[in-house]
Every structure is written in structure tokens, then in C-alpha cells.
Amino acid sequence: MKRLGIIISGRGSNFEAIARNIRAGNIPDAEIAIVIANRESAAGLEIARELGLKAICLPSKGIDREAYDAQLIGELNDHQVDLVCLAGYMRLLSPPFIRAFPMRILNIHPSLLPAFPGLDAQHQAFEYGVKVTGCTVHFVDEHLDHGPIVLQAPVDVLPTDTAETLSSRILAEEHRIYSEAIRIVLSGRFRVEDRRVILED
Ligand code: GRF
């Protein structure tokens, strides 16, 4: 059984989709070992507890990044986590954290990277006027929204869209591809050549 550690800051809908896909048997041989939020107000914590999962808050406010990340590493290792999934985690990770889990950290980002990294990617894309945007699951490296890409899904921007309607269609695709990417990574049926993740499925 592969053990996932999920790190969130807020709503937790991507985490919930992963949890439900595991329950539905769509991510074989996986379990969620721990959900960690860096804010007590993260709604995802309550969802995790309702699902009967271990969920803790490690407040990050006012704590130096490396000191905080050392706490995170400690919790993840205590729970023998094989794969770390960032799901709406709103802090940058320090190099020691990345080195503690080499090619074992995934993130979901609501744009087709490398377009629109950073905050509010859906709004950035909407304001820019692109016709197609989407979402990306990638390995995490030391740069923001940058590591090798596992999966992407496109979403058309419609003439009738607002940033909110666009965001909600992107979110539906996020919920689909994050679980699929986790399934692929846990299966080990891929290799990485430079930046390219080559799927063997
Ligand atoms: C998602 O749009 C995700 O792509 C981004 O942060 C948001 C988190 O939403 N990284 P949720 O907490 O999973 O509902």
C-alpha cells in the first residue's frame, strides 16, 4: 500500500476528489496517511475528519520557512509517506523539503503551465484573453510551478465565461487529472528524461 501525505491551505476540494477516488478504487493500492493544513481555517480539515482520515493543523504563521518545512518533513516521515500531494497549499517549499522527497512531490496548478504561474491563474488567463486554458499536475522542484509535467487538461474559454465560471470548469478537470496523475506516479510506469515525463501506460 502506498501512503499519501496531502498538504492543503484551504477549501480542500482537490484533496476530497483524491480521497473519493481512492475509495472508489480508481487509485489502486493507495491510502491517505495524513492530511496537513497550515491554517486552522482550512475547510479541508473538516472534510478529512468527516471522511475518517487523520488530519492535523500545523500553523505556519510567523514561522520561518525552513523551520516550518522541518516540521512538515517530520510529520510526513512519522506517517511513512511515499508521495506528497500539494492540493491548494499556498506556501513555497524550501530546498531542504524538496530534497527530502526527491521526485515524490506533486502539485496541481489551474493553468496550462508554463502559462500563468503563481496566484489566481484562472483570473490571469481570463484577463489575458486566452481562448484555451486548463490545468497541470507536475512534480515539484525548487522553482514556483515549474517541475516536470505529468498531465495537463485543456479547458476552452467561452464567450459567455466569467472568471468564476471558467474557474469552476477548470476545477472539474483538476479533480479528474490529479487522481489520474497520482495513479500513474504510484504505478511507476513512467520515466523522466530531462523535463519530459514519458508515460509508459
Ligand atoms: C486549485 O485551483 C488548485 O489548482 C490550486 O489551488 C486551488 C485549490 O483548491 N493550486 P482546493 O483547495 O483543492 O479546493
Image: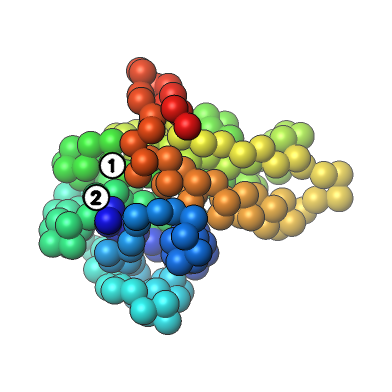
Q: Which mark is residue 53?
A: none
Camera-side residue of 43 and 55: 55
Q: Which image quadrant for residue 56? A: bottom left
Q: What residue does disc 1 label? A: 104
Camera-side residue of 130 and 194: 194
Whether disc 1's CB lies below 8 Å from ligand 1 is answered no
Residue at 28% x, 42% y: name it.
104
Residue at 36% x, 18% y: name it.
193
Q: Which image quadrant for residue 115? A: top right
Callout 1: few (<14), some (14-19), or many (20+) C-alpha neighbours within 10 Å?
some
Does the CB distance between marks 2 and 1 fall below 8 Å? yes
Q: What residue does disc 2 label? A: 82
Amino acid at circle 1: Arg
| Left or right for 159, reference 141 | right
Helix, strand or loop status at disc 2: loop
Helix, strand or loop status at disc 1: loop
Camera-side residue of 11 and 35: 35
Q: Which image quadrant for residue 58? A: bottom left
Amino acid at circle 2: Asp
The residue furthest top is 194
Residue 113 x %, y %: 53, 33
Q: Indicate whether 60 appears above or below 53.
A: above
On-image quarter of the N terminus: bottom left
Which scheme is used to colour this image of the protein? rainbow
The residue furthest right is 160
Residue 170 visible: yes
Q: Indicate whether 130 appears above or below 126.
A: above
